């Protein structure tokens, strides 16, 4: 027997997150013409019985026909989805500086693949590329290419419009790992992939902003009989309503994904995020490079964070599925565990700390000095406040990084070599994660 559970989805203290993502619901016209996600789910549930929360989340967000991210009306002209890169260009510029700094720290390899996971509108990549072109002299002869991992064909088109001025082409066949190719105005090649696995090997800097929070999570509840997985089922009293139930016996996920020494009573595990971090870690170990993951999250302390957003408001995750964004806080302690020992992990540090260490204050002063228009000045100041204020996005969002071990290696001691007293240079500090401001 499945046991029914009620999670209190609407909780206080979620204001920061609600402020960071502004979502608009689609118009009634559009809703009517779209096949119903609810109908699709109830048909599936009737056939298979309850599904895991991970399966529910995957269907709702990325179903190829009705998924939330796949619908092309998600990023409308009114901006129904605002994240840090959309709030201010400074965000992407500072990440661009971080990327160059890590490329230098790795010994300036000849090839630099910039890989972004879940690029949204492409604004972050655009701001990063602008910094790279401004600092072209620093990059020297290095050849730079951009690789975007995006499930949504509609968003890939939007990214192409923003990054390549519509100079992009779709692949002829659906089986091609690169489903779209293009070139930026400056002539940098851009390629689109559905999965990280399809991105070619090579020295890469990976960036993932608000990507991991969109990946499916499993939910587990501690019970008297041990850990049990939370599932999604049809409410028998209201056939067009969904509800949460607790599985009567262990599932594969509940017996493998919960830590033996877990102390919380309820945990969320993003196994898909874990697999992606393992892939990143393997690539960095083998080919060099670094990954920068920025998201809202915690270090293995929170419990029930699964929530929906629609029209600026928190939204019940089970009602009108497909019409609202579904998200869960990223568990950085889990990502660190999944990264394994092959790479060094830094962070999480708060967005405020990271951006301040990256020199956001100096960059703001430069922008304000050259800006006389009072409205633009006001906008600059309020977006700075949104990004860094502890009660807005400053403390809610965190930065976490995976680095090749050589990046942090202490210089070798040269004792015994009497003739060579010179020490090898200390590695460059990792920008953003230490107070040493190398770019000011
Ligand atoms: N990074 C952007 C967008 C965040 S929204 C920003 O900060 O503004 C999440 C992005 O990840 C969207 O582009 C969405 O289409 C994409 N996405 C979600 N799930 C994905 C998956 N499983 N694989 C690849 N991309 C995914």
Image (cartoon, helix red, strand yellow):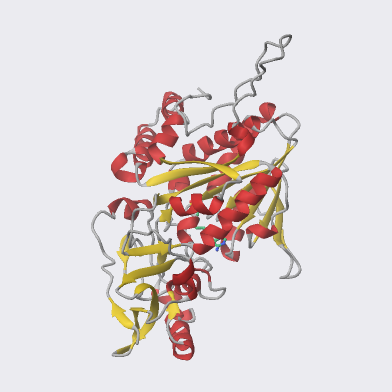
Quarter of the image where one finds residue 2? bottom left
Would residue 70 be found to the left or right of residue 312 on screen?
Answer: right
Q: Nearer the viewer, residue 389 or 199?
A: 199
Query: Looking at the picture, how far across and down is residue 286, in whole percent?
Result: 70, 46
Query: Looking at the picture, how far across and down is residue 168, in whole percent?
Result: 70, 56
Residue at image point 66% right, 54% down: 166
Q: Is residue 422 above or below residue 290?
A: above
Would residue 412 be found to the left or right of residue 390 on screen?
Answer: right
Quarter of the image where one finds residue 354? top left
What is the residue that sits farthest to the front in this orientation? 416
How many labels, in total? 0
Residue 57 visible? The answer is no
Quarter of the image where one finds residue 149? bottom right
Residue at image point 42% right, 54% down: 331
Residue at image point 41% right, 65% down: 326
Q: Nearer the viewer, residue 294 or 309?
A: 294
Query: Looking at the picture, how far across and down is residue 301, in whole percent?
Result: 34, 53
Would residue 193 be found to the left or right of residue 358 on screen?
Answer: right
Q: Nearer the viewer, residue 145 or 228?
A: 228
Residue 99 visible? The answer is yes
Query: Looking at the picture, how far across and down is residue 208, in whole percent?
Result: 53, 50
Could you tell me which quadrant the N terminus lies in? bottom left
Q: Is residue 140 above or below residue 114?
A: above
Q: Nearer the viewer, residue 130 or 206?
A: 206
Q: Is residue 440 above or below residue 19?
A: above
């Amino acid at each position: 027997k499945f046991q029914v559970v009620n999670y209190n989805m609407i909780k206080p203290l979620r204001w920061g997150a609600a402020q960071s993502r502004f979502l608009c619901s689609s118009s009634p016209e559009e809703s009517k013409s779209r096949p119903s996600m609810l109908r699709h789910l109830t048909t599936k549930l009737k056939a298979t019985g309850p599904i895991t929360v991970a399966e529910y989340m995957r269907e709702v967000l990325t179903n190829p026909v009705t998924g939330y991210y796949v619908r092309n009306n998600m990023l409308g002209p009114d901006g129904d989805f605002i994240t840090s890169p959309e709030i201010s260009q400074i965000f992407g510029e500072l990440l661009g500086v971080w990327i160059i700094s890590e490329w230098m720290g790795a010994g300036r390899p000849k090839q630099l693949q910039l890989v972004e996971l879940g690029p949204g509108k492409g604004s972050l990549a655009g701001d990063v590329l602008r910094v790279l072109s401004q600092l072209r002299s620093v990059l020297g002869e290095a050849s730079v290419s951009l690789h975007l991992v995006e499930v949504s064909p509609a968003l890939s088109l939007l990214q192409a419009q923003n990054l390549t001025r519509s100079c992009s082409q779709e692949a002829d066949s659906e089986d091609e790992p690169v489903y779209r190719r293009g070139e930026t105005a400056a002539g940098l090649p851009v390629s689109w992939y559905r999965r990280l696995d399809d991105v070619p090997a090579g020295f890469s800097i990976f960036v993932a902003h608000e990507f991991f929070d969109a990946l499916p999570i499993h939910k587990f509840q501690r019970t008297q009989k041990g850990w049990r997985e939370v599932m999604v089922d049809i409410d028998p009293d209201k056939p067009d309503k969904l509800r949460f139930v607790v599985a009567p016996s262990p599932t594969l996920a509940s017996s493998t994904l919960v830590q033996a020494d877990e102390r919380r009573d309820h945990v969320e595990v993003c196994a898909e995020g874990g697999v992606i971090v393992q892939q990143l870690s393997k690539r960095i170990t083998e080919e060099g490079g670094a990954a920068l993951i920025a998201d809202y999250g915690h270090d293995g302390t929170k419990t029930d964070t699964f929530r929906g957003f629609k029209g600026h408001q928190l939204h019940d995750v089970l009602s009108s599925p497909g019409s609202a964004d579904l998200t869960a806080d990223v568990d950085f302690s889990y990502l660190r565990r999944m990264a394994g020992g092959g790479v060094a992990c830094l962070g999480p540090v708060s967005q405020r700390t990271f951006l301040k260490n990256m020199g956001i204050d100096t960059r703001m002063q430069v922008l304000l000095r050259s800006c006389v228009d009072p409205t633009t000045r006001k906008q600059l100041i309020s977006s700075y406040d949104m990004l860094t204020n502890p009660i807005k996005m400053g403390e809610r969002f965190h930065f976490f990084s995976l680095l090749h071990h050589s990046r942090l290696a202490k210089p070798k001691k040269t004792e015994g070599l009497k003739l060579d007293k010179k020490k090898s240079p200390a590695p460059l500090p990792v920008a953003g994660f230490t107070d040493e401001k190398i770019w000011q």
